[in-house]
Image (cartoon, rainbow, N blue to C red):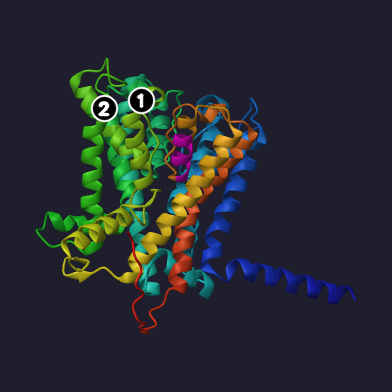
């Protein structure tokens, strides 16, 4: 009888695991959720936070790290020990690379075969056609990540060591900020983030380029080398490159003009330019701030919300709608105005690509609307600051106008859920759509629908 019960229990457990692991769109949120809970529990333990943080604050920090957001409800530099800060850095790295990337590369290094479910999930996430494509993508991701983070860490360590007159502080700040910047997390040790370093161009530009390189996928960065070889870029690289350039340029220009006599006042002309550039870069996904954002004007408020919603590029550590979604919408809009087909570099934009872009955008704004309504209903902080907080959380950006520390328990839970959805919902939805959308080759009569 006991043996029979054990068999029933094992069969039940297997069915539950199959329910979670059989479908790629379920694996991603489950693995991220488990990592968030594990990180929260570890950060709650005395060796990570000797002065004590509540469990909800530890969980908030863990989710913010795993979802590479950077929002924090506690003083990160004071509340956590060196070990606790190191754990946060590991959570940022794990969240930035992704659980599937890490687990898959372990299989490759050990020479083991991935299970069929694991392989299928990896194919959906990396949009690969074969095992060899998965392997090549993973090797590229890890080489690229290691090289960029190492280079950034060396430059930042030297800079911080000279500025702080302490090599240990330089190492600590340099390595952590390199990982945080590349993974687009936005965590830093000081209360004012990088405001104290806003007149050091080496800090501003090194971190900003780490953010950009982390916000553009390794595969796209490799193809950008073709620009120097005078070769044509593939369509996706063209969209990412030009959309990124436009967002960076106009973001910098608008922030400079809008805040010239605002939060940038008191800085020299070059520092104003440097910090306008930095805020344009970081607003799209990273969450570092080199100026006090609590007093920005309404124009800047709208600009930064738009940049946070736009986000980075697919296949990267960035959040938001992604540059490809923005690029596809603009191309469809522009070609419709000209009465032309949706063509880029002699390639047609597939209908299912447009369908996915529309679906992702609708879902994104639906989640954002719900999060904003919940915050406005439950919190007493300034409504504009709460809207900014929700946009920042869903875009996994991490910028704040000062509302984070004013959140109560309910507000923290809302932001935790928003950060989590911002990190896993787009990829999960794409996995689902990739498995569902098929070309049936069946044509139907046109439906006449008036739009005016």
Q: Is residue 141 above or below residue 248?
A: below
- Quarter residue 345 falls in: bottom left
Question: Neighbour class for label 2 at 10 Å: few (<14), some, many (≥20)?
Answer: many
| Residue 116, percent from left and from top | 51, 75
What numbered label is drawn on residue 296?
A: 1
131 relative to 31 in the view: left or right: left
Label 2: element kind: helix
Q: How far apart are the alpha carbons under marks 1 and 2?
A: 9 Å
In this view, the residue farthest toward the bottom is 442
Q: Tell me the number on the disc at residue 258.
A: 2
Residue shown at 46% from the left, 28% from the top: 189
Coordinates of residue 48 in the picture (x, y in percent): 60, 34
In the displayed structure, would residue 444 be above or below residue 90?
below
Q: Magenta-highlighted stretch: main secondary structure?
A: helix
Contact? badges 1 and 2 (CB < 8 Å)? yes
Of pointers 1 and 2, the one earlier in the residue sequence: 2
Q: Which residues are magenta?
A: 387-394
């Amino acid at each position: 009888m006991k043996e029979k019960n054990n068999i029933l229990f094992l069969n039940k457990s297997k069915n539950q695991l199959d329910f979670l692991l059989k479908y790629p769109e379920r694996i991603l949120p489950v693995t991220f959720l488990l990592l968030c809970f594990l990180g929260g529990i570890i950060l709650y333990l005395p060796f990570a936070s000797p002065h004590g943080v509540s469990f909800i604050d530890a969980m908030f920090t863990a989710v913010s790290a795993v979802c590479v957001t950077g929002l924090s409800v506690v003083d990160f530099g004071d509340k956590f020990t060196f070990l606790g800060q190191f754990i946060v850095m590991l959570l940022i790295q794990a969240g930035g690379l992704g659980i599937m990337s890490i687990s898959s590369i372990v299989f490759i290094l050990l020479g083991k075969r991935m299970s069929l479910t694991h392989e299928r999930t990896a194919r959906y996430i990396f949009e690969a056609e074969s095992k060899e494509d998965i392997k090549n993508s993973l090797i590229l991701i890890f080489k690229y990540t290691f090289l960029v983070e190492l280079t950034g860490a060396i430059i930042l360590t030297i800079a911080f060591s000279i500025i702080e007159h302490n090599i240990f502080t330089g190492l600590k700040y340099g390595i952590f900020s390199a990982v945080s910047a590349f993974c687009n997390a936005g965590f830093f040790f000081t209360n004012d983030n990088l405001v104290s370093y806003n007149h050091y161009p080496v800090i501003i530009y090194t971190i900003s380029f780490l953010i950009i390189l982390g916000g553009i996928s390794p595969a796209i960065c490799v193809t950008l080398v073709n620009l120097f070889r005078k070769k044509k870029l593939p369509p996706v690289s063209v969209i990412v490159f030009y959309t990124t350039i436009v967002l960076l340029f106009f973001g910098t220009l608008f922030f400079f003009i809008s805040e010239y006599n605002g939060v940038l006042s008191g800085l020299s002309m070059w520092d104003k330019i440097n910090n306008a550039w930095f805020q344009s870069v970081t607003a799209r996904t990273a969450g570092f701030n080199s100026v006090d954002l609590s007093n920005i004007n309404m124009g800047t408020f709208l600009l930064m919300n738009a940049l946070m919603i736009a986000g980075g590029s697919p296949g990267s550590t960035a959040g938001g709608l992604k540059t490809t979604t923005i690029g596809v919408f603009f191309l469809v809009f522009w070609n419709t105005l000209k009465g032309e087909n949706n063509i880029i570099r002699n390639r047609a934009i597939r209908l299912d690509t447009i369908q996915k872009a529309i679906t992702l955008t609708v879902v994104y704004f639906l989640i954002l609307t719900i999060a904003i309504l919940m915050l406005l209903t439950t919190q007493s902080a300034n409504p504009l600051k709460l809207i900014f907080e929700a946009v920042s959380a869903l875009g996994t950006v991490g910028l704040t106008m000062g509302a984070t520390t004013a959140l109560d328990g309910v507000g923290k839970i809302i932001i935790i859920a928003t950060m989590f959805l911002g990190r896993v919902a787009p990829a999960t939805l794409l996995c689902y759509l990739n498995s569902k959308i098929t070309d049936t080759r069946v044509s139907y009569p046109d439906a006449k629908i008036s739009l005016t």
